[in-house]
Image: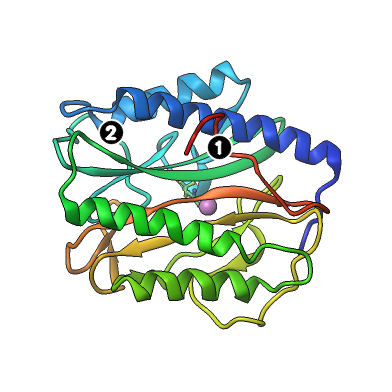
Amino acid sequence: MVYIKSKREIALMKVAGQAVADAFKTIKEVIKPGMTTMDIDQIVINTFIKHGCISAEKGYYGYPANACVSVNEELVHGIPSNKKILKEGDIVSVDLVASYQGYMADACRTFAVGKLSDRAEKLVKVTKDAFFEGLKQVKVGNYIGDISHAIQSYVENHGYNVTRDYTGHSIGTHMHEDPTIPNYGKAGTGMKIEEGMSLCIEPMVLEGKKDIRVLPDGWTAVSKDHKLTAHYENTVIVTSEGIEIITMYEGEE
Ligand code: MF3
Ligand code: CO
């Protein structure tokens, strides 16, 4: 079931989107070696509260934290812990869903801890750029498969792989609404893009093989070959003029 959002609903989602963006802004400023992934969870919930939001992740199918914080080989759904200490050169994906009066926005950034290796730096950049390649396809009359195809081709042309186990999605009063937006697929297939759709476009990229494994905690998905992974996501509204990204902060590149 596809929900086309009204102006009123989009306004509420934007408040959630700014809470997410503000958390990213703070994390980018303060992230450093010696911090724990639980410290990041604390920053997130404090920021959400400031914006009148709650975390939609907490309690989602029993998820135990406010944020998903996935380090290096962890692709998605890393559970914050005060035992997990960040070190120089780590890449840390922070995937957040805020809810404002029941309306949600979802985004992810992969942050650098100190100075990165060239190898990590390149993976993070290609993952982010893949989002913007997908974004170019978001226009009324195009197909969801156009986004998927653009992301997959861009990532594979750089020698990396996209996950087959997780996808992008629409969002609103539910975290996951139709349409599903895979990071792989054929152009010209799937649902037609319409004004009022809200799309979470989220390349999840593996440096090595595409296979993942879920750790015994039941959540953390890691690359089977232990190579690096990265993730970048925004919630995007399809408008009559084009698109609007609601999960970036002012001045964010
Ligand atoms: N942000 C994730 C997504 O894009 C969902 C997180 S799963 C949760 O679907 F359990 F943490 F909520
Ligand atoms: Co998402």
Q: Is residue 238 above or below residue 20?
A: below
Q: Residue 171: x percent and y percent?
A: 66, 51
Q: Residues within 10 Å of mark 1 (few under 14, many from 20)?
A: many
- State the residue in front, 45 or 111: 111
Q: Which residue is mark 2?
A: 37
Q: Residue 181: x percent and y percent?
A: 58, 66
**Visible residue check, residue 75:** no
Q: Is residue 163 above or below residue 99?
A: below
Q: Is residue 20 left or right of residue 193?
A: left
**Visible residue check, residue 47:** yes
Looking at the rendered structure, the secondary structure element under dot 1 is loop
Q: Give the number of marks.
A: 2
> Residue placed at 59% from the left, 59% from the top?
135
- State the residue in front, 213 or 115: 115
Q: Is residue 120 left or right of residue 21?
A: left
Q: Amino acid at mark 1?
A: Met
Q: Are marks 2 and 1 in contact (CB under 8 Å)?
A: no
Q: Residue 170: x percent and y percent?
A: 65, 57
Q: Which residue is mark 1?
A: 248
> Residue placed at 28% from the left, 73% from the top?
159
Q: Residue 88: x percent and y percent?
A: 14, 36
Nearer the observer: mark 2 or 1; the answer is 1
Q: Is residue 45 left or right of residue 16?
A: left
> Residue placed at 48% from the left, 68% from the top?
151
> Residue placed at 43% from the left, 70% from the top?
154
Looking at the rendered structure, the secondary structure element under dot 2 is helix
Q: Earlier in the sequence, mark 2 or mark 1?
A: 2
Q: Amino acid at mark 2?
A: Thr
- State the residue in front, 238 or 163: 238
Q: Is residue 85 left or right of residue 134?
A: left
Q: Is residue 192 above or below residue 116?
A: below
